[in-house]
Amino acid sequence: MTTATIAPATRRQPQPGLFGFALSPKQAWGLLFVAPYIAIFLGFVVFPVGYAFWLARSPQLYVELAKDPIFLRTAVNTLVFLIVAINIKMVIALFLSGFFTHKRWWVKVLAVLFVLPWAVPSIPTIISVRFMLNPEWGVINQLIFSLTAEDGPNWLNDPTLALSLSMVVHIWKSLPFWTLILLAGRLAIPVELYEAASVDGAGALHRFAYITWPSISTLYVTCTLLSMIFTVGDFNSVYLLTGGGPADLTHVLATLGIRYLRLDQIGLAMASIVCCLPLVLPLVFFMMKRLSR
Amino acid sequence: MTRARILRGVSTEAGLLLVGIPVLLWTLIPIYHMFLFAISPKDAAFSGQLWPTNPTLRNFGVVFGQEHHFLYNFWRQMWNSIAISCATAVLTLMIASAAAFAISRLRMKGGRLVMNLALFTYFIPAAFLAVPMYKTMGMYGLLNNDFALILAMVTVASPYAIWILRQASDKLPVELDEAALIDGASPFQLFRLVYIPLMVPSLIAVGTYALLLAWNEYLYAFLLLSNEKTLTLPVALGNFLSADDSPWELLMTAGFIYALPPAAIYYAFRKYMSSGLTAGAVKG
């Protein structure tokens, strides 16, 4: 017991820190433990971001960017992608999360299989979809040919179709994740509420409107915003399916930077990213407020 | 049971099936299509049949034997993928658990700031950081070096890892630390002997997350590595696409092999993943 009381007492003595001010041993240990992350953060986040802003400092770049029709097209594509793909995805996820609450053995098996698109890497599956869409020997056009004796569309050669298909691929890939999150939200709702409602004769629609939705609406909005932030950075769905083509008409902001990089226009690559910060930063700050408590 | 009740039961089941069957098809078709390519002989893959007339494992033999010029470095690239993912997982675990310990258990000053900076990094879309990261790695002289990709992946993975670990460690009772400190343990001993053993389930979740993130990464790998011998598998697969005479059935076979380990790891650690990772997201 004596050692026990003495030990903390000696610990509490302040020691002069590196910069002359007092640093308790506990704080010093804290700094030591957090130092590796700080090093990574400074070396691979702060420095690159600072460098990016420095490269993107010339106003001339933004004039050039505004004149580039591909950039404008990309900005529109990105907005369409965000608004259309995410809302469709989240509504389907909301619906399917309800489906997966049903207790059947085969629904359980299906739930396990359903996660596959999220669990496997995107490149082989996206390439697989790309083969299906091949106009000459892809399985989809073969099917169309054998059913109607007419040639199917040249899927990835039409900018609208190609961008829509990128959205489909994006939805295919990320739907399981959001469905599982919303499912977890639904399962957290007390069963008694539903039982009481059933006794009162509420139908499925009423139960959804008065119990389910009020309980998970916050989660749903959080997920939608989070998904937006993630989707702005979705490079694979577009790049691996369309490569930005045809004629660079299906780029989104995530792939445009890489295109400029390939053309050796680093300044433009950085400027294009800086341009969408007004769109992304408010979302990020809002999410941080929600999540950092 | 009345007739109406039976009818209602049947219609519920029918309704469920009406949702379940499309969901099953939607989920499996791209994966099955890939599998079909992998087990079909070279020319039969395009026939549009549901099951090949002569299923074969020949493609797997070609891939494993590196018998095609696209595949001369298959095992090398497989090894790169394995090494880079494992290194990313280990480094992320060390860095993130130490940071979470400092923030949550040692209550270090400025811990909240560090957490917020990490969260901020988590929300910067990875594709935005890719181009600056590429330039920076060039300045550090790390391009075409496995470490470039490992460090980039640790940068991307650790914010979320810290966040998840901090939430889990906030739930551990404070009395544990106090007891250990009274017994004369140094913070490092507290970390190694008390904290780490208690955090094992969350550490498994976070390690799996980092491992899968690095294994699946395409964009960073494709920017940071370009030498045929340092490539990871996804970049090698992507390179197939740019050639005109690509052997599709081999591409799909290699892709299938590449997709198996993450799926297996995911299912093996599913319990940890769903409790650890979805808990974080649901809290918001």
Image (cartoon, rainbow, N blue to C red):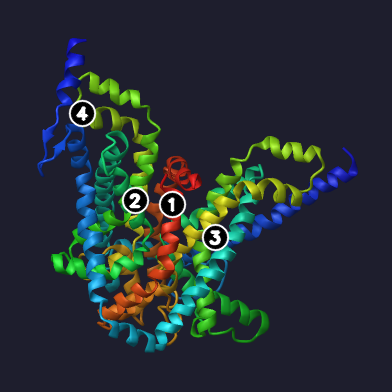
Q: In what element is the residue under mark 4? A: helix
Q: Which chain letter matches label 4?
A: B
Which residue is the site of mark 4? B189
Name which residue lies at 31% across and 53% down. B117
Q: Amino acid at mark 3?
A: Leu
| CA–CA distance in space, label 3 to label 4 | 49 Å
Q: Which chain letter matches label 3?
A: B
Name which residue lies at 80% across and 37% down. A199
Residue nearest the viewer, comparing A165 with A288 = A288
Which of the two labelled residues, at mark 2 and mark 3, occupies the earlier sequence position? 3
Q: Which chain letter matches label 2?
A: B
Residues indicated by labels 3 and 1 sit on the same polypeptide chain: no
| CA–CA distance in space, label 1 to label 4 | 34 Å
Q: In what element is the residue under mark 3? A: helix
Name which residue lies at 35% across and 67% down. B127
- The quadrant of the rendering that contains the N terminus of chain B is top right
Residue nearest the viewer, comparing B277 with A122 = B277
Residue B155, above or below A215? below
Q: Which mark is residue B116?
A: 2
The image quadrant that residue B213 belongs to is: bottom left
Q: Nearer the viewer, mark 2 or mark 3?
A: 2
Which residue is the site of mark 1? A289
Q: Amino acid at mark 2?
A: Asn
Q: Nearer the viewer, mark 1 or mark 4?
A: 1
